[in-house]
Image (tube, grey):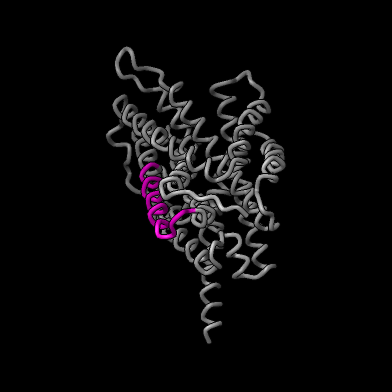
Amino acid sequence: MRIHHIGAREAAAIGIIFVITKIFLPFQRSMAEIGGTAGWIIVLIAVLFCPLCWWAIRGVIKNGSKGSTLITATEEILGTFLGSVVNFAYFGFFFMITFIVLREFSEILVTDILPRTPLRIILLTLLIPVAAIAHSGIETLGRICWLTVGLIVASVVIMLIGGLMTHTEPHALSPFWGTGKSRVLTMGVVKSSLFSELLVFGFLMPRMRKAKEWGKAAWWCIAVSSVILFCTTIVYLYIFPYPSATRINVPLLEISRIIILGRWIQRVESIFLVVWLISIVIKLSVALYCTAATLSQMMRLPKHQPLVFPLAISIYSFAMLPPSVMTAVMWDRDLLRTYGSIFSIGLPLMTWLAGIVRNKWRQL
């Protein structure tokens, strides 16, 4: 198998975009529904669990043979049968991210931007560039992410500042514990799955040129992603106070629509829509690449490319399963963002501990 290599900057950029793109979906609304005025505290608690995911992934790969990915190292540690079961769970996780996010964003486009365009056309229009980018490999993904991550982050910062300058509610975060202290603390632990996309580092780390830069890429990703998710949540609550915050389908789109900075700076959502589209396409490309890479490594294929387009067709079919946009949002909120930490923290941590026990046993 030909090994493609990326640098720490590219790996961090892939991770950042893969994690933060959820801010363009009903993410902030979900935090407001769960925590009320304390939705931002849930994000802070979830951030505390990020290191667990990173340490577990690193531990699994280091317990495998040289050049192993998360998938191959898992099979080496747990054996063929149990390792295949865990790897199939990873495959299902990335597959589910791909088709749910595809359906959610397509519905946003149909509802708010292109109401006369059929949903199937939107799905296909998004899937074609996604499949092409995923087919090109990790090097292309890394370069695209590095070129666009600054644009995406800068646009979000400008939009949040513009929203705050247009309208704020001084007492928006009162009461402090929102829907209740116990509920907020509990849901903060449950929503550690907000950062479950960090699992992508199981594929990025072995492809990096220098192993000593693994930590640099991961910590930069964690730091930037945490700040972006936290800031978008707390600013959203200041601009659209609870309970109004629970009634807006696409929070950042509404923030961009209310920005008025003088006579000449109004209705800037058309500018930010381009950035959102780029971010969504990249996230879907990364998810599709990880899905294809997981399956190819499980099947011991030399390349992931032959699986990309068949998987894209399957993803299109699954994206049509939710009967409505609210069903797709519920699948994201109640499945991915509730049980995602099982895949990103639980399974790697279990595999890492099994690898430690195996190595101790061999030394006896």
Q: Quadrant of the N terminus?
A: bottom right
Q: Position of residue 149 (x, y in %)?
A: 42, 38
| Number of numbered discs visible in the structure rendering | 0
- Against 73, residue 308 (above or below) is above
Residue 305, can we see it?
yes
* Location of residue 187 with respect to 163 vertically, above or below: below
Placement of 262 over or under 330, stated as above or below: above
Toward the left, the furthest residue is: 170
Q: Work out which residue is located at the far top of the displayed protein and give it.
A: 263
Residue found 63% across the figure and 59% down from its top: 87
Q: Residue at x 61, y 55 (%)?
A: 90
Seen in the picture, residue 224 relative to 302 is either above or below; the reply is above
Q: Residue at x 65, y 56 (%)?
A: 297
In screen coordinates, is 22 left or right of 302? left
In x, y percent, where is residue 292? 64, 48
Q: Quadrant of residue 228?
A: top left
Give the camera-side residue of 228 and 175: 228
Residue 212 shown in magenta: yes
Q: Is residue 241 visible?
A: no
The quadrant holding residue 76 is: bottom right
Magenta stretch in the rendered image: 208-228
Q: Main secondary structure of the magenta part?
A: helix
On whether residue 52 falls in the magenta region, the answer is no
- Residue 287, image x and y in percent? 58, 45
Q: In this view, which residue lies farthest toward the front? A: 2
Q: Foreground residue, 102 or 334?
A: 102
Q: Is residue 112 left or right of residue 118?
A: left
